[in-house]
Amino acid sequence: SFNAEIYANLSVLEIIGNVGLVMIVLEAALDLDLKREKIGMILQSFLVALIALIGSSFAIAYIIMFSVEGAQDLYKALIYAVPLSIMSSAIIIPSVGGLKGNKKEFMVYESTFSDILGIMFFYFLIGAEQGATAGDITIDVLKNIGVTVVVSIVLSYALVYIFQKLTSQVKLFLIIAVLMLMYALGKKFHLSSLLIILFFGLVLNNTNIFFRGKLSKLVNKESVKPIMHDFHILTLESAFVIRTFFFVIFGMFITLGSLIDWKVASISVAIILALYGVRFIVLKAIVRYDITPQLFSAPRGLITIVLFFVIESHPEFKLENFDEGILLFVIIISSFIMTWALIKYNGGKMKDVLLAQMQSLKVDKDNDGQNDKFKDVVDKNVEDQDFNQF
């Protein structure tokens, strides 16, 4: 018979997971375009991502403690809660292209920060000493981040400078290999390795900001452009392969019985309500006005699954009675909610979009192969876009 637990404990799976995390953070960092006029929005999105992450993590942890048998340890419950609290930038970024004004950029920044902060928070919990107090963990985290930021800045400048000088045709995988080496060394010295990857992506994507004044002589923008272009393609395709791989492996863990288990469904609904409840409060407090469809655009996906496998490879943190079906329910429901919100925001109806390909329901008087009604709605939304308002 098939034993999924064997796969969860494979060291190869952990290695692939680490590569996936590096690719995800790098892809997210390459989407962060830093500009002076965007500082306010960037700070807003950072605060929303940080506060929502922490608030959701504790809310879900208490739900797990209350509803899962043998899960009375807050520390272990929190480790399970963090992956469920992280938004999936891999789903959000391709999905929000039709949003008006700053809404799109806000969602890109927020989902990126949620990915990065969530992964860091998770690994701090995994790496923290058992029995340590909250104060001790906080001090260790601040020290770790301080040292890592200094190391990251130095390494990022050095790597961008060196890589633009490479004349070899084999550049991209050499760069990836070096980044993986930096990630491994960072973990060896108990640094936040993902910060190194984040800063490298930021510096590479914003050379005009980081290489200013005398430093501008150290970088050739024409040499950096092709590296940036190739990196976008590499990270995009690699993330797709890794995403597919982990979703297949995750499917092996799901038992069909959990899909019709009322207890699993009720826990999942409670988690969904906690996620959107916390998100509503945070958006109202920080953004204040016009918070739709941002409120409902918070799906869970690849990060949740990858970090779930990290827990599976650490038996000391496992909750034996935690049903993996909860993850599946939360991922499906949150993705469906975002789909509904985006369709409604664009003036469409769910049934029109889902059934748009059925020829009998189409109205196509001009014979261009598109539903006339749906096309008119799209054209109107494009014309009505206001890029100066949130």
Image (cartoon, rainbow, N blue to C red):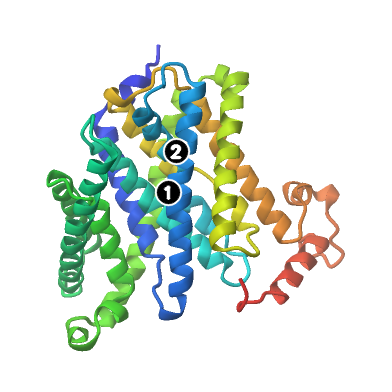
The three-letter code of the residue at mark 2 reads Phe
Amino acid type indicated by mark 1: Phe
Q: 262 and 3: which one is in front? A: 262
Q: Is residue 70 left or right of residue 378?
A: left
Disc 2 crowd, CA 10 A, few/some/many (<14, 14-19, 20+) = some
Residue 88 visible in the snapshot: no
**Picture residue at 83% right of the left edge, 54% below the top:** 362
- Residue under circle 1? 240
Where is residue 216 drawn, in percent x and y? 22, 85
* Position of residue 321 in the picture relative to residue 377 (left or right): left
**Res 292 quadrant in image:** bottom right
Q: Nearer the viewer, mark 2 or mark 1?
A: 2
User: From mark 2 to mark 1, how far is it between C-alphas?
Assistant: 31 Å
Question: Mark 2 sits on what residue?
Answer: 58
Circle 1: element type: helix
341 or 357: nearer the viewer: 341
User: Dot 1, how many residues are within 10 Å of its Cα: few (below 14), some (14-19), or many (20+)?
Assistant: some
